[in-house]
């Protein structure tokens, strides 16, 4: 797909990967609809996009992707403004990382499912009729390595991303005859606001090695590449593919590493108390 002049919705566009993706579309001359809750951040980005000079346009829609009425407003405003939707990037999402019993049932568990899963499903459902009518479209769903490998403290976040994986796989097989491509991106660690909102507390200080960390810009570039040359899934950086292989074919080994290198050291005091 040549993205110049195409209409792209990017959710979660107020920061991080969504912001970087929107900029990348704008550099290619696309018309970008920016959706998120923080409207001040969106308006600042919109001014930047309008000044790029590639023919790009930006339109801001304040939307909470956990609310169906906000999603309906997002889709309706896009159609009213531009008359079509060519690209949907379901990027909005967040994580709360802790032991399952410590997670708040509403603020941590239900909220993650509402945004990370239901937000993706409902936004896609409302965009699809227009893409089907156009006989063309590109949907890129932001997954995560947590959508392929479940690790301790990621129970709900991983569940939400596994759901996105299954949803996208089924959807791809539903809509391909209409000329609609569905792609998944699986980034490893990315330098964004994610960690600051996730509530991470780790004695072991376990984290993604620096040489494997991605920038939001790198992920944004990958998203636009997937729109231009669709593929089913893209794991970035490629080294994580080895971990996915090990998890699939040697799950016992991966269990042992996670439990003995992370779970036991992190919960040592609790285990001794029992």
Image (cartoon, grey):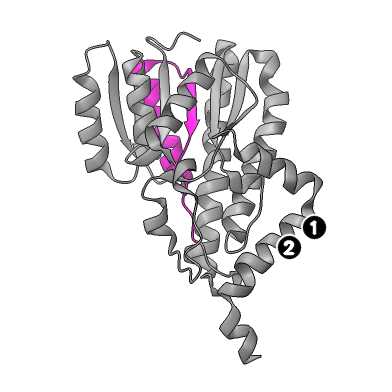
Q: Which residue in the structure is indicated by mark 1?
A: 252
Question: In this rendering, is residue 231 above or below 234?
Answer: above
Is residue 217 at least partly visible in the picture?
A: yes
Q: Position of residue 273 (x, y in %)?
A: 61, 91
Q: Residues within 10 Å of mark 2 (few under 14, many from 20)?
A: few
Work out which quarter of the rendered image holds the C terminus and state it: bottom right
Identified at 49% across, 56% down, the residue is 207
Identified at 56% across, 40% down, the residue is 143
Q: Secondary structure at mark 2?
A: helix
**How many tags in the picture?**
2
Query: Which quadrant would residue 148 be assigned to in this image?
Result: top right
Residue 99, disc: none
Q: Residue 91 lies in magenta, yes or no? A: yes
Read off the magenta span: 67-96
Q: Are marks 2 and 1 in contact (CB under 8 Å)?
A: yes
Question: In this rendering, is residue 3 above or below 42?
Answer: above
Q: Residues within 10 Å of mark 1 (few under 14, many from 20)?
A: few
For this orientation, the residue located farthest to the front is 211
Identified at 37% across, 10% down, the residue is 5
Q: Nearer the viewer, residue 217 or 129?
A: 217
Q: Position of residue 194 (x, y in %)?
A: 41, 51
Give the distance between the C-alpha atoms of the residues marked 2 and 1, in whole angstroms.
6 Å
Is residue 77 at least partly visible in the picture?
A: no
Q: Residue 99 lies in magenta, yes or no? A: no
User: Taking 191 as reference, is 102 left or right?
Assistant: right
User: Taking 242 as reference, is 202 left or right?
Assistant: left
Q: Secondary structure at mark 1?
A: helix
Q: Which residue in the structure is indicated by mark 2?
A: 256
Q: Position of residue 208 (x, y in %)?
A: 50, 51
Q: Position of residue 196 (x, y in %)?
A: 37, 57
For this orientation, the residue located farthest to the bottom is 273
Q: Nearer the viewer, residue 242 or 215?
A: 242
């Amino acid at each position: 797909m040549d993205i110049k002049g195409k209409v792209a919705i990017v959710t979660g566009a107020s920061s991080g990967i969504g912001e970087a993706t929107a900029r990348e579309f704008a550099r290619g001359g696309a018309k970008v609809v920016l959706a998120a809750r923080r409207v001040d951040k969106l308006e600042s980005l919109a001014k930047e996009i309008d000044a790029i000079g590639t023919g790009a346009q930006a339109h801001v829609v304040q939307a909470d992707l956990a609310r169906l009425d906000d999603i309906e407003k997002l889709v309706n405003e896009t159609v009213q403004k531009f008359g079509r939707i060519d690209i949907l990037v379901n990027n909005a999402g967040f994580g709360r990382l802790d032991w399952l019993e410590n997670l708040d049932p509403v603020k941590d568990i239900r909220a993650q499912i509402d945004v990370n899963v239901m937000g993706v499903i409902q936004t896609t459902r409302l965009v699809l009729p227009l893409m089907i009518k156009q006989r063309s479209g590109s949907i890129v769903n932001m997954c995560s390595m947590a959508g392929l490998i479940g690790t301790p403290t990621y129970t709900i976040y991983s569940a939400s991303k596994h759901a996105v994986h299954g949803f996208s796989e089924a959807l791809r097989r539903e809509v391909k005859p209409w000329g609609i491509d569905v792609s998944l991106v699986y980034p490893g660690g990315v330098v964004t606001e994610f960690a600051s909102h996730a509530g991470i507390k780790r004695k072991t200080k376990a984290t993604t090695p620096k040489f494997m960390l991605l920038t939001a810009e790198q992920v944004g570039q990958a998203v636009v590449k997937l729109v231009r040359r669709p593929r089913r899934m893209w794991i970035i950086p490629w080294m994580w593919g080895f971990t996915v292989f090990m998890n699939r074919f040697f799950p016992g080994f991966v269990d042992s590493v996670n439990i003995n290198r992370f779970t036991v050291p992190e919960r040592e005091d609790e285990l001794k108390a029992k």
